[in-house]
Amino acid sequence: MNVMNLLADSGFVMIPLFLFSVIMWTIVFERIWYLRKFKSAYFNFDLKAQELLAKNNKLSELKGYCSSAPEILNAPYKVLLDSQEKKFPDLEERLERRLQEVHLNLKQYLWVLASIASTAPFVGLFGTVVGIIRSFEDISKSGKGGFSVVAAGLSEALIATAAGIIVAVIAVLFFNFFLNWVNSLSFDFRNRFTDFAAYFKKD
């Protein structure tokens, strides 16, 4: 039995599971691309910012460079540099909010993976119930039992259950993988920014 036959035998419950799968893999590939891009961008950004700071300590050049970077990267740096002129009384709170925004941006869409992981098994279970009901309907229509009568309903039930579990397991694995990756990136970004900010606290 090929994949198309399996899908055909699994009933309408496979439609939401198929949609879950498409959404899940879309998020997986998008997050891999985005997080790799972010890691490369902030590493190069911080390296250049540290270089400019060490060479000439010109805030105007640093501000110009920060302005050219993506907002998700430059937001905490801009607050820090602006504070050298405006003397924000709540500087620590401003910086913490910007760093939290970076972390939340990296976690974007992960809640969808968590939702799929928790929902897919129940969708599969619903498919199981539908398949069993179909089996009983087949028995009532034929007036007799036997495996040949209930085979279609049981096949639908088992395929839906297996599909729901598979989608959920994959979603959980990727959710944990990305959560660990995001926490690592966020921690490294915060540490690099803290090292950069420490320069302005020397005076």
Image (spheres, rainbow, N blue to C red):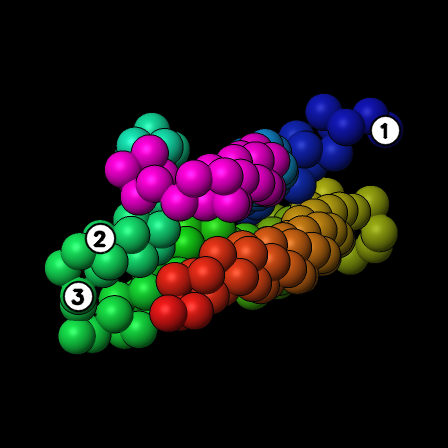
Q: Which residues lie in the magenta part? A: 37-63
Q: Is residue 119 visible?
A: no
- Verify whether residue 80 appears in magenta: no
Q: Amino acid at mark 3?
A: Lys
Pick the residue in front: 175 or 143. 175
- Which mark is on residue 198? none
Which residue is pictured at 45% across the width and 61% down the height? Answer: 199
Mark toward the start of the polypeptide (1 vs 3): 1
93 relative position to 44: left or right: left
Horizontal and vertical percent for residue 45? 50, 38
Instruction: From the image, tell me which residue sits under label 1.
Output: 1
Which residue is pictured at 41% across the width and 54% down the height? Answer: 102
Magenta stretch: dominant secondary structure: helix
Q: Quadrant of the N terminus?
A: top right
Instruction: From the image, tell me which residue sits under label 2.
Output: 82
Residue 34 higher or lower than 89, as above or below = above
- Which mark is on residue 87? 3
176 relative position to 78: left or right: right
Q: Amino acid at mark 2?
A: Asp
Helix, strand or loop at label 1? It is loop
- Verify whether residue 55 appears in magenta: yes
Q: Nearer the viewer, mark 1 or mark 3?
A: 3
Horizontal and vertical percent for residue 187? 58, 63
97 relative position to 123: left or right: left
188 relative position to 96: left or right: right
Q: Amino acid at mark 1?
A: Met
Disc 3 crowd, CA 10 A, few/some/many (<14, 14-19, 20+): few
Mark toward the start of the polypeptide (3 vs 2): 2
Disc 1 crowd, CA 10 A, few/some/many (<14, 14-19, 20+): few
Mark toward the start of the polypeptide (2 vs 1): 1
Residue 1 higher or lower than 179, as above or below = above
